[in-house]
Structure formats: structure tokens, C-alpha cells
Image: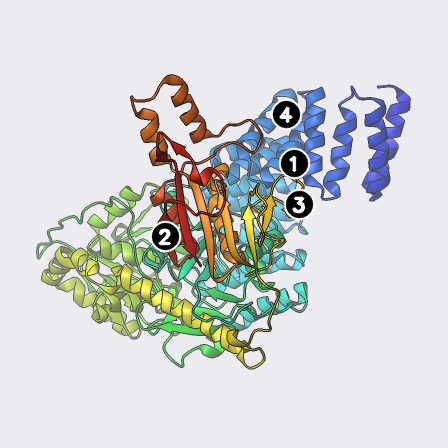
Amino acid sequence: MNKELEKRIAAADQMRDAGDLAAALGIYEAVTEENPGLAIGPYKQATALSRLGRADEAEQRYRDALALDESYPEALNNLAVLLVVRGEWDEGDLCYRRALAERPDYFEAHLGYAHLLLQAWRYHEALFFSRRACALKPGSALAFERSGTALWKLGRIREALDEMSKATKLEPDLASPWITLAGCLQSLNRYQEAEQSYLQAVAVAAGDPVPRSNFVFLSNYLDIPREEGWQRHRAFGNWTRQQLGAVVALPPPARLLPDRRLRVGFMSGDLRRHSVAYFVRGALERLDRNQFQLFAYFDYQKEDEVSAWLKPMFHQWRDIFAAPHRSVSEQMEQDRIDILVDLSGHTGANRTMVFAARAAPVQLNYLGYPNTTGLDTMDFRLTDIWTDPEGDGDEFHSETLWRMSRCFLCYAPPENTPEVSVRELSESEPVVFGSFNGRVKISDACVSAWVRILQRVPDSRLVLKCIMGTEDEESRESLRQRFVVRGIAAERVEVHRYHDQLDDHLRHYAAIDIALDTFPYNGTTTTCEALWMGVPVVSLIGDRHAARVGHSLLSSVGLEELVGTDVDDYVRIATELGADKLRLAELRATMRDRLLASPLFDRRAMGQALGDALRGMWHQHCASFSAELPMETEVVEQEQPIRLHVGGKQVREGWKIFDIEPRDEVDYVGDVRDLSAFAEASCAEVYASHVLEHLPPQDILPVLNGLHRILVPGGTLYISVPDIDILCWLFTSPAFSKPEKFQIMQMIFGGQGTPHDKHCIGLNFDFLIDYLTDVGFSSVEHVEAFGLFDDASEALVADHRISLNLVVTK
């Protein structure tokens, strides 16, 4: 590269860095055009495009640069950054490793690669590369913050605190180290310090909701008045309103039909191996699919085996990880969601800003968060009469409380869990109490109560096992010392580290006789797991939802007598139960059967109750417009609905043709996957012969949804596809010659003479019926022929009709 070119690029770099991106981009483009063999041209273009927010174009230019110089470290690093944002980790991983192979001392690549590895849960590798970044640039707060995060996730919390301390001192105006520091402190029960760290993060990240949301979430663990907790949540809601401005009200339903089939979206990053998943399954498994069409919006970087068994419960599963809030809202608008359910609240990977901007007509807070969201756009919160008794606490919610007369939870234990172990308790055998709740829930008041129980039950022991905060010996000892300083001998308190394998975790209940619930933040999954493994749980009724979940769960399984009304009562119940060895043996032997027969496991009743709640919320929404809008019977007369022939070739009076290829006879040109040109209820009849098989499986349901949308109520869909059952039978028949079988094969896979003549899916009656039912069509009739058009729906092979023809009514 000559000096003149170097000067031009340097001048453009100055413009770019000064914010004059358009001028810099113009110079970079000229350099690229004049020097087509130099990788620096497209690379520099990409840097400007990236700063302009044109990520797709930037990615292409980085790839153009790498096509000219495959070992260009800066292009590899910057491309990896874009890929990681999109969640494409495999290629991002490769790019980082190639960049570091070319330049082993490349600080930015070490730092970026550490970030990717943290996202992918590869914590030991993340620690290596973040520490290498610290060594390369000791003044980088981000390097120390990522090193500290890796240590925290590995359970080496004391070391993590040291790294975070360095990070916050190096760059006190950087929010992420303060957030991670707060998380570490919170996991060690150092609540006041955690609060201060979150507030510091809030102060330096004025427009970021994350530290504010984390600060609000922390309040659930604190023994503070309900009014104070409410004010914290409400302050968050007020802040979102300041950020977003006045919310534009969504239009009323196109037709005020309170009892029509509803589209319900569930948004969460926890549709995976997470506590939420075990309750979502129980709630949704028996929800009436004729009444509700379910959409999942999955907001996590990685699916797992639990995601795999949840997916079939939804009509559509959308991966929204890393998608901007606006894109998520637009997707929900396209999906025409009626009710949007938030399963996260202020927990990790939440989308409170999407709900704050009003993404759906009805918005519901359920399951994943034990408190109000504080948002004025969250319409309802689904709860029950035990966790939120009638008339108690409504003033501490921005939502309307919708109370179920059954437990708001329905537990579905993991597959293939261990059997309940037999535990022989002789009169001389000491009783073992235990708690497998998160360490963050073990409040000082909780420790004091447990100390009293241990003092009253001679020789008894306490076993603690937590998901965070007990991985290293120093952390385990610090938890043990909370009991020692209150007079309990160290050997009476066992603190175990977290076990990642679920079977190992559940088997630890074999050594426990009585589980002690935490307060003021009760356990939920841990309570259900203990009961499932035959261990009774003693709980305490508090003054808010999080402190009453134990009451709801134990009431559901007929063990209300194990719920204390105050701390003294809680201690009494645990002490008396610890002395009753026969009662403990009886409970252990019968507990699993008790659960299976209880409302907590009744998925059918839960599905009915949840459906009734969703329908009731929708009724209220429709009623809110009834005073100002005409009802369905009074809708203003509109244009006459049309009869639409999708993919048609023949002109016929009264029918309009819609096709992907423009021709003289075509009235509308477009792809059947995008029917946005047609208004809702604009078609009296739709004819689609041998169209669906040309679509990939993931597009079938959206296309049928689109066809359902454009049909008038009572409208008719004529739909035909090659019947894969008939074609497979014909193909395997010995009656046909090789050329004839080749022709049948083409009927299965498409002639493929044009880009559009390819078959992507095979459909039979059962498959197609499932799709049509999912979409909400009311009736289906199987016919030999339509008698409307001379097309493939009439095709015969050896006197056998090869087309599956259905007349479908909306």
C-alpha cells in the first residue's frame, strides 16, 4: 500500500472517529473501487457501516475483506463480534481462534473471546482468555470484570470479588463491573453492599434497564415493608415511562368477539432446564388448543433437552435471543398476539422494556416473578387465594390481581427422577433437617429460626446445599459460621456444593428427614422437589406473595399443618415433627402418591383454570371497548369479499389469481408466505391447490394462519396437496416400471424444472388435519374432487387419485 493511499485512509479514519461517518464511508468506498485487490478497503467500509448500525452490510464487507486476506486479524475479530451478538457462536468461536492464531497478543480478540465463552458456559476457558487479556492490558476494567465473572460462575466468589474490586476502581463509570459485583455480594447474603453496587451501576448507566431491574429484584430477598418494596417497583415503572414516553394505545380488536380463539404468547429465557420450565409444562399441557393458539418467544442463547420437550406444546417457537426490543414487538404484531404472558418479571434475561412499550392488547405477569413488575402496561398478574388473599396487597401492584381458586402452580417433575429412598429412623438416630434453596434466600431471620430448631432437637443436624455461593471451601465456611456464631457446633452444619447433575441433586434428599423453607422468600421448585422425594417441608406464612408460596403448595397437597403462622409457630412445627419418627416415616412412604393425587399435579384442572383466566381477561379487554364501539353485528358494511385462487393458472369469472410469478392473468403478485396485501376477512373463498408442499415445514403453520386471517367467518378454504401416503404406496408397488417410478418420485419431490417447483414437505391427511386444527378452522371435509379448476387436484396415476383434497371452513 503506497503512502498516498495510507494518507487517504488515515484521513477517512479521522472523519470516522470524529463522527462524520458518511464522508468516511465515501472515501473507503472509493478506495475499495480503485484497489479491488486490497482487503483494507472493504474492512474499513465495514467499520463505518457497523457504526452506522448497518450490521448486515458490515458483515458482508468483513467477509469480502477475508475473501481477499483470510488471515486478516481485525476483520476476523470484528466479524466475530457481529456473530456473537446474533448468537452464532460456532462461527464466532472459529473467527476468534483464527484471529488469535495470527496475532497471539491481540487484546480485543482475547476480551471478545472471553465474552463468547462466558455466554456458552465454558467458564474455565473464559477465565484463561480473560486473564490473558488482563495481562495484556492491566488497565482494562472489562478484562478484570470478565475474569471476575468467570470466577463467580465457577463458584470462586472470593477471588471474583477481588477482580470486581479492581474493575470498579479502574473504571468507576462502567456499569457492568458494578452489576457483577452486586451479584457476587448478593450470593453471599451481603445485601446492603449489593444494593449499593446496584445503585452505583444505576448512577453510571442512566439509560440501561438492567441495573435498575436487578436492584428491584433484590428487594424480594430483603425483610423490608411491603410499601417500600412497592415503591421500588413503581419507581422502575415510572422510569420506563420516562424513557419510552407516552405509550401509544393499541387499536381495539378488529371484531369484538370475546369467545374467539386467542393467540397467546409466552415470553421467557427460561424455557430450558430451569425452575420455570417445570411449571410451564404443567400449566400448558392440557390448555385447550381449540381455544388458544400458543406462541413461545425464547430469549436465551442456547436450547437444551428441556426446550426440546417443551417445543411441541407451542404452535410456534420463536428464537428472539439478541433481537432488539423493537424487532421483538414487530414480530408479535405480525403474529397478532392477543395475550402476552411474561414469565420473567425482573429475573435474568427479561424483556420488561417490550412489555413497557405495550406489545400486545392484554399483558400478563405470571409464574416467573413473585411480585409486581411495576409497569403501568402490565394488565394482570395471575396468582391464587393463598399467595395473594382477596383484598390483601392489591394496592402494592400495578397489575390487576387475578386470583385462582386453586394453586397458581402445577408441578411437572423432570423425567426419570430417582425413586423415593427408604430412610430408617430409630429412636436413637438423630433427625436431619435440610434446605436446598439458594443461599441468597437464607436471611438472618431464617438462620436464627433454624438455630432455635437445632437447639430444641437434640443431636439434630442441618444440611445445606445451594446453587450458588457454596462452591469453594471459603464460601462454605462463611455460611457455616453464621450458625457457629449463634452457638451451633460446626459439625452439626453440613454445607454441600452445588451438583449440576439433576439425579445427583435429587438423591441428596435421601439424607434429609425434614426440609426447612426459607423466608421471607420461600422456595418453589425446591419445595416441590423435596416433597417429590418424600421429604416433608415446614414453611412460614409471610405478608407477601414470595413469603406465601409454601402455604399455597402445602395446602394443595393437604399438609396445611406444616405451615407456621409466625416464627414461633414455624419453630414449634419443625421441632414437633422432628420428634415424631413414626409421622416422618409415614410421610416419606406416602408423599409421592399424595402429590400425584393432589391439585398440584392435576394438569387437566390446571389447564381448565388457566384457560378460564385467559378467557376472562380477554372478556374484560373486549368489554372496555363496548361502550365506544359497535359490536360485531353492527360493523359498518365493507367491500364485497373476493374469491382468491392461490397459484392459479386458469382465468375464471369471479376469481382473482395470486401467484409468485407475474403473468397477464395474475391479479396479485406475491409470495403466499406474505399475505399482508389482503385485509383481514377480505376473502369469501380461497383455493390453494398443490401449494403447501412447496414450503419448508416451519412455514406451513404461518401460511395457514395467513389464509385463516384473510377468510371471512364461515369462509371456505379449498386446499389440496400430493398425498404422500398414496405416492409412497405407488412407488413401492411392483406393478410399475422404472420410468414410471421415476415419474412418481418427481411427484414426491417436485419436477424442479423451475426454482419454485420443489417440494419441501410430504403431507398426508393426519398431518394436514393437525395443522388445520392448530390454526383454528372449524370443520374439514375430505372430498374426491372440487370440480372448480382443471389442475393437479384432479391428477390420476394408474386410476388412483394422488391428491388429498379438503374443503375447510373457518
Alpha carbon distance from label 3 to label 4 = 27 Å
The secondary structure type at the circle numbered 3 is: helix
Residue at the image position 40 percent from the left and 27 percent from the top: 744
Q: Residues within 10 Å of mark 1 (few under 14, many from 20)?
A: some
Q: Which residue is mark 4?
A: 99
Where's residue 374, x and y in %?
A: 54, 69
If the image is split into quadrants, where does the N terminus sit? top right
The secondary structure type at the circle numbered 1 is: loop
Of callouts 4 and 1, which one flags the residue occurring earlier in the amino acid sequence? 4
Q: Which residue is mark 3?
A: 170
The residue closer to the viewer here, 229 or 674, is 674
The secondary structure type at the circle numbered 2 is: strand
The amino acid type of the residue labelled 2 equals Glu
Of callouts 2 and 3, which one flags the residue occurring earlier in the amino acid sequence? 3
Alpha carbon distance from label 4 to label 1 = 21 Å
Alpha carbon distance from label 2 to label 3 = 72 Å
If the image is split into quadrants, where does the C terminus sit? bottom left
Question: Residue 10 is drawn in which quadrant?
Answer: top right
Viewer can see residue 469: no
The amino acid type of the residue labelled 4 equals Ala
Contact, CB < 8 Å: mark 4 with mark 1? no
Q: Is residue 753 above or below residue 707?
A: above
The amino acid type of the residue labelled 1 equals Pro
Alpha carbon distance from label 2 to label 4 = 61 Å
Q: For the residues carrying marks 4 and 1, which lies nearer the camera in this image? A: 4
The secondary structure type at the circle numbered 4 is: helix
Q: Residues within 10 Å of mark 2 (few under 14, many from 20)?
A: few
Where's residue 527, x and y in %?
A: 29, 58
Q: Which residue is mark 1?
A: 138
Q: Which residue is mark 2?
A: 781
Of callouts 1 and 3, which one flags the residue occurring earlier in the amino acid sequence? 1
